[in-house]
Image (spheres, grey):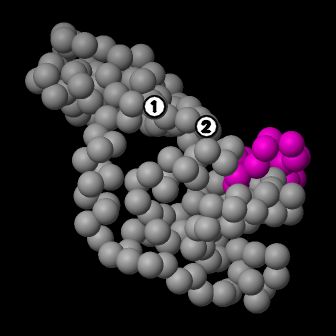
Amino acid sequence: MRKESEDTHMDHIYDVIILGAGPAGLSAGLYAGRSRLDTLIIEKGQDGGQIAITDEIENYPGQMQIQEYLKTGDFRIVNLETTITDKNCYPSTFSGGTWLTAEAPVLDDLLDFGFNLWGIANNHMLDYSYPGLFQTLSALRQRGIAFTGAGESLEKASKAAIAES
């Protein structure tokens, strides 16, 4: 599977042409590439499509291999690049353009991968203003997740996280 400009694929005959580079399109392209099929994926927007705003991804190709690999490390750090809300709060007017939120079961999915230290200092933590931040903090604490980078005060946001290896 290769990425090409529009001009280079007009005269080429592909085995498979996939419309959309979202989760399903990329998975289909992955399997077509593994089968050594000459594959073209066409996406009008950004690669990844709706995956950035999808609440749940099932049957992720390679999930077991990724989990096994991650669990070989003593510290498995993840950046939670979203808020965790019940979708009952309003987006902030000061977002960078894309407001990200997911429901709490996403945390369970990430825990299944074996992450044991979470960073939450990023440009999306206030996408849903303070109610979104507070719901995120509550969901992390309910699961006993070690996190750092945001909090109800500067002191709490600066507090070091301690993870067991």
Residue at point 85% right, 53% down?
Answer: 92
In the picture, the quarter occupied by the C terminus is: bottom left
Mark number displayed over residue 31: none
Q: From the image, tell me which residue sits under label 1.
A: 58
Name the residue type under label 1: Glu
8 sits left or right of 145 in the view: left
Classify the position of the N terminus by image quarter: top left
Q: Position of residue 106 (x, y in %)?
A: 58, 46
In this view, the residue in front, 160 or 33, is 160
**Picture residue at 31% right of the left edge, 61% below the top:** 70
- Above or below — where is 149 with respect to 106? below
Q: Which residue is mark 2?
A: 55
Per the image, label 2 sits on a secondary structure element best described as loop
User: 3 or 72: nearer the eye?
Assistant: 72
Residue at the image position 16 percent from the left and 28 percent from the top: 34
Label 1 sits on a secondary structure element that is loop
Q: Residues within 10 Å of mark 2 (few under 14, many from 20)?
A: few
